[in-house]
Amino acid sequence: MVLLAVGEWGRFGKQVITYSKNGPPRTEQRGIKERDAPQRIADYWAAVDKTLSGVDDVPWSAAFISWDIESAGVTRDLFCPDQRHTIYVERIVERARKPGAAFIPHAPDAYAPRVGDLVCASREGSGTTLQNLNRGAGHCDIVVDVQPGHLSAIGGNVADSVTRSVFPLDANGILSPISGRPVFAVIENRLP
């Protein structure tokens, strides 16, 4: 999952956005936009059984995550791809109640993210939480690097590209709250 995400980030020109605890996000480097890579975005959509591309103006971030996880060889009995993040997170929550779950959801203030985990946030004031998966607007990124004080995660359709987002961590490795991306869950990846 991680290597695929990093590869796609490279394919899209290595766009980077840095989030801080008390300021607006900062774009460090701009990448290739979705309209310049419609066939690749169509590949992401195929993972959720849709025929769309980067010129359709339909949010494709969940299709990107679904494509990445499926392309890494994760079977649909462990992860159920969907065109909406909150739907596959809802399914992860349901499966986590059973033994042998591959993905375990955690409150962001109770778990230190590791490489391969998913960081999920609500969007557009949807109010989505782990306790209220209302199928509202959401977004997840794949953690690709964790360092003291920050982590990097890659997601699709962030500023119309595949983007590496840098998030602040506290001294215990827990995500710091940020206004630009209200994280509601960290999904632990227990796959080898």
Image: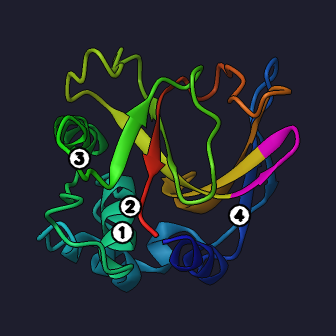
Q: Going 43% across and 28% down the picture, which residue do you hit?
A: 123
Mark 2 to mark 1 CA distance (whole Å): 6 Å
Q: Mark 3 points at which residue?
A: 88
Query: Cβ–Cβ below 8 Å for labels 3 and 2?
Result: yes
Q: Nearer the viewer, residue 105 or 151?
A: 105
For disc 3, the neighbor class at 10 Å (few under 14, some 14 to 19, many from 20) is: some
User: Which amino acid type corresponds to the residue marked 3 in the rendered image?
Assistant: Tyr
N-terminal-most mark, 2 or 4? 4
Q: Name the residue under label 2.
A: 65
N-terminal-most mark, 3 or 2? 2
N-terminal-most mark, 4 or 1? 4
Q: Going 39% across and 82% down the picture, which residue do you hit?
A: 40
Spot occupied by residue 135 in the image (x, y as percentages of width and height) = 20, 29
Q: Where, by quadrant of the figure, is residue 137 drawn?
A: top left
For disc 1, the neighbor class at 10 Å (few under 14, some 14 to 19, many from 20) is: many
Mark 2 to mark 4 CA distance (whole Å): 17 Å
Of circles 2 and 1, which is in front? 1
Boundaries of the magenta span? 145-150
User: Residue 15 got which mark?
Assistant: 4
Instruction: In the rendered view, tell whether residue 149 sits above or below residue 62.
Output: above
Most prominent secondary structure in the magenta stretch? strand
Look at the image and tell me whether residue 54 can be seen. no
For disc 2, the neighbor class at 10 Å (few under 14, some 14 to 19, many from 20) is: many
> Along the horizontal axis of the image, is 150 left or right of 145?
right
Of circles 2 and 4, which is in front? 2
Look at the image and tell me whether residue 178 can be seen. yes
